[in-house]
Image: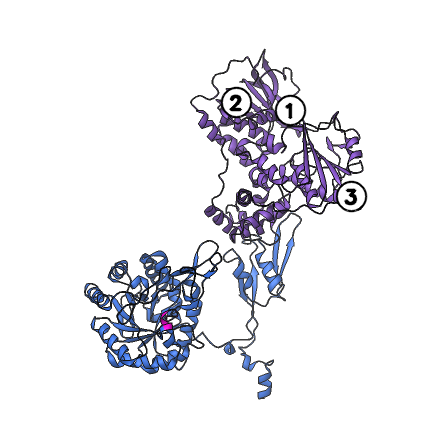
Chain colours: A purple, B blue
C-alpha cells in the first residue's frame, strides 16, 4: 500500500496467528489412511479419460495403483516422469476442469477420484524422504542451451534437457526462481515455501545453472544468446498487465492484482501486510479470485469482485467462484468500470451496468458507486514485446510451431508467452518438456529449429 | 417369519449358527457372550489330555486386500491351553445356564484307543450334546501325530471315529481337513466309522504372507514363522466345493453336514444350506467383528426364506445339490453373450482391456468425436466367459444373456466332436 494514507487496523478482531492460520493449506493433505481410501475409489480405467485431460499426460491410473500397492515413491516417479512440477500442479491445477472432470466416477453421480490430492500425497512422500533425485542426467552431449525465464516452462525444459544430456543456463529477471509458482499463485495453495523447495529438488539433477537478476534487455539479448549458445528457449510468460483505460488509474490504492499477490507471497508475516478496508477486485479469472480471497483473508471488511459479464463467461472455475463466495467475497456481475474517484488516494469507483445486445456487450447507462480504498485489477496480462525483436508475434503472443520452434532458427518458446493451451502451470510444464525434446532433435540435426 | 430351527445328528438347535471350535469358544466368558448375542450353539475349543499345551506369542497372520479389508487370516494357535477339568466345569455351567443352546465338545488325542475313549467319556460326562473329533488342525498338533496327521489317513479317521462311537452315547461329529487330495475318502471313512455328522472344512494349510523386513513368514515368532491354518472368506469356495462333493457322492450321501469355511453373511449361510449343510459353524467373521454379526445372519436368512417362501431350513436345504454335476453333464449347446447397458456404463474400459488382453477380443472400444467412449460386444467373438461382467465396477451394467439356440441338451460324452464318442461308435 502507498504510504501516508490513514487506514484502520487491517483486521478487526483477528490476531496475527489467526491471519497466519487463514493462509494454511486450502486443501489439507491426505493422510495415509485417507490416501488409501481415495485410491480405492479409482477404477484403474483403461486408456483413462483423466490421462487425456491432463496436459502433461500423467499416467494417473498407474500412479494411483502404485499408491494402492504401497509403492508410493514409484507413484511419485510415474508423476514426475511426465511432469517434474507435479508437486505444484497437485496444489494449483484446476483439477475440477481437468483430470477430475474427466474421471469416469462422475458418470455414476459419484464424486470423482481426488486425483490432485493423491498426486500431492505421492510427490510429497518422495520429496520428504530427501533421497537421491529420481532422474539421472544423460551423458554429456557438449551442447549448451540458454533458457530465458526460470518459471515452470523454463525449468521444466531445463530439467528435461538435463535428462537428455544437455547443459543449460537459465536467465531469470527476478531474484528467485519459480516464476508464477513463486510469485503468482495464491499463498494458501503453496504453503511452506513449496515453490522454492520444488525448484531445489528439480535442480538436483545437475547441469542447470540459473543466473538471477538478468532478463531479456540490455544485458541479455536474444541475438547474443543465439550466437553464444547452441539453442535458446524463451519462457518469459506474460510480463505486462492490461489497463482499464480510465483516468486516475495511477492513483494510489489502485494496483495490479498480480503485484498484490506477489507482495503477499514474498511476505513471511502476512499479518504485517496492509490491506484495504473495502476492496474492489476487477476481473473474472482465477487471478481475480486469488486476489479477492486473499484480501478477505488479510482482513478486508468488504471485498467486491466486479465482472463485466455473467458468471458463465468468467474464466475462473465454478469451484474457485464458490471459494470466493465462501470466503465472504461479494460477486457483482454485468458491471464495467466507468470511473475512479479520489484525489490523493482512491475513494470510490463508479460502474455501469451492462448487458448483451445483438451479441455485443453494451452499457445500459445505469451506474452505481462502490466506496473503496483498494482496487485490484485482474483483467489479464499480455506479452511484453520489448526485447523480442525478430520474433514473430501472432495474436498478441509469440508465434511458435507445434514443435515450439519460432521463426528464428534455434530459438524455441513455450509457456504462457505462446498460444499452446490454457495459461496454466501444467501447460507451461508440458510446453517446456516437449520443447526440450524438440531442441534435442534440432541439435541432432533432425528438428526444425 | 421363517422357522430357523434345525436338526443335525439328532441335535435340535434354535438356529443353524454355531461358533466353531476356536479362540471364540475358549472359555465360559466368551461362550456366555455368544449365547447372549443369539448364537444357537458352540463347539468348545478343542480339548486334549492334561497337561495342557503351551501356546506361542504372535499367533495370527492376515491376508489384507489393498483397502485393508481382511480376505483371510491364518493362525498357529494350538488347542485349549487350559486344564481339562476347568474347561469341563465351565461347559457344565454353560449347559445348565443355557439349556436351549447346543454345546459340542471338540477333542483330539494321540492315536491310541484308550486315550481317545477316556477323553471322550470325560467330555461326554460334562453334559455336551455331542463330540466333535478334531482331525484337521494343520499346524503344531499334527507334528505330534494329532489333528491333520490323523485326518489325512482315512483308516485312522475311521478308527478314531469308531473308538469314540464305542465309548459314548452322544452323537459324534468327525471334523475333516481340507488338506487332502479327495475329501470323499476321509468323509466316507468317517461314515463307515459311525459318525453321525461330518464337520468341514478345518483350516487350509498356508503361509499367509512373508514379512519382507524380517524375511520370515507371518506371524513372525522371534524371527521365524511356520505354516498355519487359513480361514475366513477366502476359503469359502474351497469349503463349498467339499461340502457339495460329500452331499452329492453316493458313498457319502445322507451323512449330516456341519458346514464351516468363510461364512460371514446370511448369504454365505444360505449357499451352504443349499448345498446340503444341516447346520453351520462360524469363526473368522466373529473374530473380525464380534458376536453381534449373528444378528444379521439370522435376520437376513429369515428375510431371504420369507421372500422365497421357504418356511423351514429343510424347505431349501440341498436344493442346489442336484444342479451340482460333473463337467461331463453340462449342456454343450448352451450359449450366453455379454450385453453392455450403455446407460449404466461409466466408460472405464475395464471390460475391454480384460477381454482384449486376456480373453477373446470380443469388446470393441470406440471414441466418438465428442469424446464419448463406447464399448460394444462383438457377438461372434463372445464365448460367454463372464469375465467382463465380473470386472465391471457397476452392478448390473453387463448382463450375460442366454441365446435362444433351439438346440437340444447335449453333454460332452454325447458331443459329435468328442473323439471318445466316435471311438465308442
Chain of the residue on which disc 3 is drawn: A
Residue beneath disc 2: A273
| Position of B153 relative to A298 (above/below) | below
- Give coordinates of residue A220: x percent, y percent: 74, 28
Judged left or right of residue B130, residue B424 is right
Quarter of the rendering containing residue A137:
top right
- What chain does badge 1 belong to? A
In the rendered image, which residue does mark 3 sit on? Answer: A443
Labels 2 and 3 within one chain:
yes
In the image, is A47 to the left or to the right of B411? Answer: right
The label on residue B385 is none
The location of residue A224, given as percent across then percent down, is 79, 31
Q: What is the magenta segment's predominant secondary structure?
A: loop
Quadrant placement of the N terminus of chain A = top right
What distance separates the C-alpha of mark 2 from that of mark 3? 49 Å
To which residue does mark 1 refer? Answer: A362
Q: Is residue B423 visible?
A: yes
The magenta stretch is B136-143
Note whether residue B209 is visible. no
Q: Is residue B136 above or below residue B357?
A: below
The reply, left or right, for residue B131 in relation to residue A377 is left
Q: Quadrant of residue B262?
A: bottom left
Distance (Cα) linking label 1 and label 2: 38 Å
Badge 3 crowding class, 10 Å Cα cut-off, few under 14, some 14 to 19, many 20 or more, is some
Q: Nearer the viewer, residue B102 or B326?
A: B102
* Magenta highlight on residue A83: no
Residue in the foreground of this view, choosing between A416 and B247: A416
Amino acid at each position: 500500500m502507498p504510504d501516508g494514507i490513514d487506514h484502520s487496523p487491517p483486521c478487526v478482531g483477528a490476531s496475527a496467528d489467526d491471519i497466519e492460520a487463514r493462509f494454511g493449506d486450502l486443501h489439507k493433505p491426505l493422510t495415509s489412511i485417507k490416501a488409501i481410501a481415495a485410491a480405492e475409489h479409482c477404477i484403474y480405467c483403461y486408456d483413462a479419460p483423466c490421462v487425456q485431460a491432463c496436459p502433461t499426460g500423467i499416467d494417473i491410473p498407474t500412479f494411483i495403483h502404485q499408491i494402492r500397492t504401497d509403492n508410493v515413491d514409484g507413484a511419485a516417479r510415474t508423476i514426475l516422469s511426465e511432469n517434474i512440477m507435479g508437486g505444484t500442479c497437485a496444489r494449483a491445477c484446476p483439477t475440477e476442469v481437468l483430470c477430475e472432470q474427466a474421471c469416469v466416477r462422475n458418470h455414476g453421480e459419484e464424486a470423482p477420484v481426488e486425483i490432485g490430492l493423491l498426486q500431492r500425497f505421492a510427490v510429497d512422500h518422495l520429496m520428504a524422504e530427501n533421497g537421491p533425485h529420481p532422474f539421472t542426467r544423460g551423458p554429456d552431449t557438449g551442447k549448451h542451451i540458454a533458457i530465458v525465464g526460470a518459471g515452470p516452462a523454463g525449468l521444466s525444459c531445463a530439467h528435461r534437457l538435463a535428462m537428455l544430456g544437455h547443459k543449460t543456463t537459465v536467465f531469470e529477471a527476478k531474484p528467485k526462481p519459480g516464476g508464477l509458482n513463486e510469485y503468482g499463485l495464491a499463498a494458501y495453495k503453496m504453503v511452506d515455501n513449496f515453490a522454492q523447495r520444488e525448484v531445489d529438488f528439480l535442480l538436483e539433477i545437475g547441469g542447470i545453472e540459473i543466473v538471477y537478476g538478468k532478463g531479456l534487455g540490455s544485458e541479455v539479448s536474444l541475438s547474443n544468446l543465439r550466437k553464444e549458445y547452441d539453442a535458446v528457449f524463451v519462457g518469459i510468460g506474460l510480463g505486462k498487465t492490461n489497463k482499464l483505460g480510465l483516468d486516475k488509474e495511477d492513483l494510489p490504492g489502485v494496483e495490479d492484482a498480480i503485484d498484490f499477490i506477489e507482495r503477499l507471497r514474498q511476505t513471511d508475516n502476512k499479518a504485517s501486510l496492509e490491506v484495504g478496508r473495502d476492496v474492489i477486485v476487477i476481473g473474472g479469472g482465477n487471478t481475480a479470485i486469488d486476489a479477492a480471497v486473499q484480501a478477505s483473508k488479510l482482513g478486508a471488511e468488504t471485498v467486491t469482485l466486479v465482472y463485466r459479464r455473467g458468471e458463465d463467461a468468467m474464466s475462473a472455475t465454478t469451484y474457485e467462484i464458490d471459494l470466493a463466495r465462501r470466503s465472504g467475497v461479494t460477486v457483482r456481475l454485468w458491471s464495467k468500470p466507468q470511473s475512479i474517484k479520489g484525489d490523493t488516494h482512491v475513494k470510490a469507483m463508479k460502474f455501469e451496468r451492462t448487458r448483451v445486445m445483438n451479441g455485443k456487450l453494451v452499457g445500459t447507462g445505469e451506474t452505481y458507486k462502490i466506496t473503496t480504498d483498494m482496487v485490484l485489477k485482474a483483467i489479464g496480462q499480455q506479452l511484453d514485446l520489448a526485447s523480442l525483436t525478430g520474433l514473430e508475434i501472432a495474436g498478441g503472443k509469440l508465434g511458435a510451431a507445434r514443435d515450439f520452434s519460432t521463426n528464428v532458427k534455434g530459438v524455441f518458446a513455450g509457456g504462457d508467452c505462446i498460444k499452446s493451451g490454457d495459461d496454466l502451470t501444467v501447460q507451461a510444464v508440458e510446453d517446456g518438456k516437449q520443447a526440450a525434446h524438440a531442441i534435442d532433435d534440432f541439435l541432432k540435426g533432425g528438428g526444425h529449429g | 417369519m421363517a422357522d430357523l430351527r434345525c436338526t443335525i445328528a439328532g441335535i435340535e438347535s434354535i438356529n443353524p449358527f454355531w461358533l466353531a471350535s476356536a479362540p471364540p469358544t475358549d472359555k465360559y466368558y466368551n461362550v456366555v457372550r455368544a449365547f447372549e448375542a443369539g448364537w444357537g450353539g458352540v463347539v468348545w475349543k478343542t480339548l486334549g489330555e492334561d497337561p495342557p499345551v503351551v501356546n506361542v506369542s504372535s499367533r495370527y497372520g492376515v491376508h489384507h486386500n489393498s483397502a485393508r479389508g481382511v480376505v483371510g487370516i491364518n493362525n498357529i494357535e494350538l488347542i485349549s491351553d487350559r486344564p481339562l477339568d476347568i474347561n469341563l466345569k465351565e461347559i457344565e455351567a454353560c449347559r445348565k445356564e443355557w439349556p436351549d443352546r447346543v454345546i459340542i465338545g471338540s477333542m483330539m488325542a494321540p492315536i491310541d484307543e484308550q486315550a481317545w475313549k477316556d477323553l471322550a467319556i470325560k467330555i461326554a460326562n460334562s453334559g455336551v450334546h455331542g463330540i466333535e473329533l478334531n482331525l484337521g488342525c494343520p499346524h503344531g498338533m499334527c507334528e505330534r501325530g494329532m489333528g491333520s496327521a490323523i485326518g489325512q489317513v482315512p483308516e485312522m479317521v475311521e478308527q478314531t471315529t469308531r473308538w469314540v462311537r464305542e465309548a459314548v452315547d452322544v452323537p459324534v461329529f468327525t471334523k475333516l481337513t481340507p488338506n487332502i487330495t479327495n475329501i470323499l475318502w476321509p468323509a466316507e471313512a468317517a461314515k463307515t466309522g459311525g459318525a453321525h455328522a461330518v464337520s468341514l472344512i478345518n483350516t487350509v494349510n498356508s503361509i499367509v504372507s512373508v514379512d519382507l523386513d524380517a524375511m520370515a513368514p507371518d506371524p513372525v515368532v522371534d524371527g521365524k514363522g511356520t505354516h498355519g491354518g487359513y480361514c475366513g472368506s477366502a476359503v469359502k469356495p474351497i469349503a463349498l466345493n467339499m461340502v457339495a462333493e460329500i452331499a452329492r457322492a453316493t458313498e457319502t450321501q445322507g451323512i449330516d453336514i456341519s458346514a464351516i469355511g468363510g461364512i460371514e453373511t446370511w448369504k454365505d449361510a444360505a449357499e451352504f444350506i443349499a448345498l446340503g449343510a444341516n447346520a453351520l459353524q462360524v469363526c473368522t467373521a466373529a473374530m473380525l467383528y464380534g458376536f453381534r454379526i449373528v444378528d444379521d445372519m439370522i435376520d437376513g436368512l429369515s428375510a431371504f426364506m420369507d421372500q422365497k417362501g421357504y418356511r423351514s431350513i429343510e424347505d431349501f436345504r440341498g436344493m442346489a445339490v442336484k444342479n451340482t454335476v460333473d463337467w461331463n453333464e453340462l449342456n454343450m449347446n448352451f450359449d450366453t453373450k455379454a450385453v453392455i447397458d450403455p446407460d449404466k456404463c461409466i466408460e472405464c474400459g475395464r471390460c475391454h482391456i480384460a477381454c482384449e488382453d486376456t480373453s477373446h477380443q470380443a469388446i470393441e472400444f470406440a471414441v466418438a468425436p465428442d469424446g464419448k467412449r463406447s464399448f460394444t460386444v462383438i457377438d461372434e467373438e463372445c464365448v460367454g466367459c463372464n469375465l467382463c461382467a465380473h470386472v465391471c465396477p457397476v452392478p448390473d451394467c453387463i448382463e450375460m444373456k442366454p441365446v435362444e439356440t433351439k438346440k437340444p441338451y447335449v453333454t460332452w460324452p454325447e458331443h459329435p466332436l468328442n473323439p471318445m464318442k466316435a471311438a465308442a461308435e
